[in-house]
Image (spheres, rainbow, N blue to C red):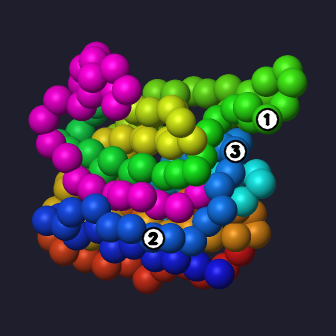
């Protein structure tokens, strides 16, 4: 099963009601040749993509409103919000951390520059993906086997759509 969200350079957020929720286990960024891919991998099923929007200007942490210092590298950022999702299992006693970090790291890819977690609160995760060229059309999708949210961001400039990869 796949749910795809296209994020054009001028688009607002979109709803993608697919996943049942999950625990974040890894965040990766890689150069796929003509686009950069950011993958959020989950156990216990993937979350829904609540929104994926382009933002410019100073980034802030969602729950505190405090600015991200230093600023996120790149000309703009794609902010993706997923729910229900967390990076620790609150149902276990004692609490089990499923994603110990990093919560901010450089990607140094052709378009993706940096990733920063902006929120992990009340079963909602928000991550900012810094980019050099926000004029592209990013594709975010929920995938299974393994459960993950995948975001593809083209290298080129202008509105370009990449074909989603439906392989598990």
Residue 64's image quarter?
top left
Above or below: residue 104 compared with residue 40: above
**The one of 41 and 161 positioned closer to us in this rendering:** 41
State whether residue 143 appears in this view.
yes
Residue at the image position 43 percent from the left and 42 percent from the top: 126
Q: Residue at x 65, y 55 (%)?
A: 21
Nearer mark to the viewer, of 2 and 1: 1
Q: Position of residue 58 (x, y in %)?
A: 17, 29
Tell me which label, 2 or 3, sits earlier in the chain: 2
> Mark 3 or mark 1, which has the lower sequence index?
3
Mark 3 neighbour class, 10 Å CA radius: few under 14, some 14 to 19, many 20 or more: many
Start-end of magenta stretch: 47-71
Instruction: Kindly check if marks 2 and 3 are in contact, taking CB atoms under 8 A apart as contact.
Output: no
Which of labels 3 and 1 is toward the front?
1
Tag 1 or tag 2, which sits nearer the N-term?
Answer: 2
Determine which residue is flagged by label 3: 23
**Relative to 130, is 42 above or below?**
below
Residue 107: where, in percent of width, then height?
Answer: 44, 40
The quarter in which the N terminus is drawn is bottom right
Q: Name the residue under label 2.
A: 16
In the rendered image, residue 112, in percent from the top left (x then y), is placed at 36, 48
Label 3 element class: strand
Predominant SS along the magenta part:
loop
**Marks 2/3: CA distance?**
18 Å
Q: How far apart are marks 2 and 1 (CA)?
A: 25 Å
Mark 2 secondary-structure assignment: loop
Image mark for residue 25? none
Between the residue at mark 3 and the residue at mark 1, the CA separation in whole angstroms equals 11 Å
**What residue is disc 1 on?**
91
**Would residue 141 appear left or right of 128 to someone viewing this image?**
right
Q: Which residue is drawn at 36% across and 41% down?
A: 128
């Amino acid at each position: 099963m796949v749910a795809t969200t296209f994020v054009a350079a001028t688009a607002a957020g979109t709803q993608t009601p697919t996943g049942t929720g999950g625990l974040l286990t890894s965040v990766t960024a890689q150069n796929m040749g003509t686009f950069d891919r950011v993958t959020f991998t989950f156990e216990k099923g993937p979350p829904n993509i609540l929104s994926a929007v382009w933002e410019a200007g100073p980034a802030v942490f969602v729950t505190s409103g405090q600015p991200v210092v230093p600023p996120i590298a790149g000309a703009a950022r794609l902010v993706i919000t997923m729910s229900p999702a967390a990076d620790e299992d609150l149902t276990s006693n004692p609490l089990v951390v499923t994603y110990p970090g990093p919560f901010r790291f450089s990607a140094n890819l052709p378009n993706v520059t940096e990733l920063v977690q902006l929120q992990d609160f009340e079963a909602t995760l928000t991550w900012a993906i810094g980019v050099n060229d926000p004029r592209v059309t990013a594709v975010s999708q929920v995938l299974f086997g393994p459960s993950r949210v995948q975001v593809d961001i083209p290298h080129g400039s202008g509105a370009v759509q990449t074909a989603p990869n439906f392989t598990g």
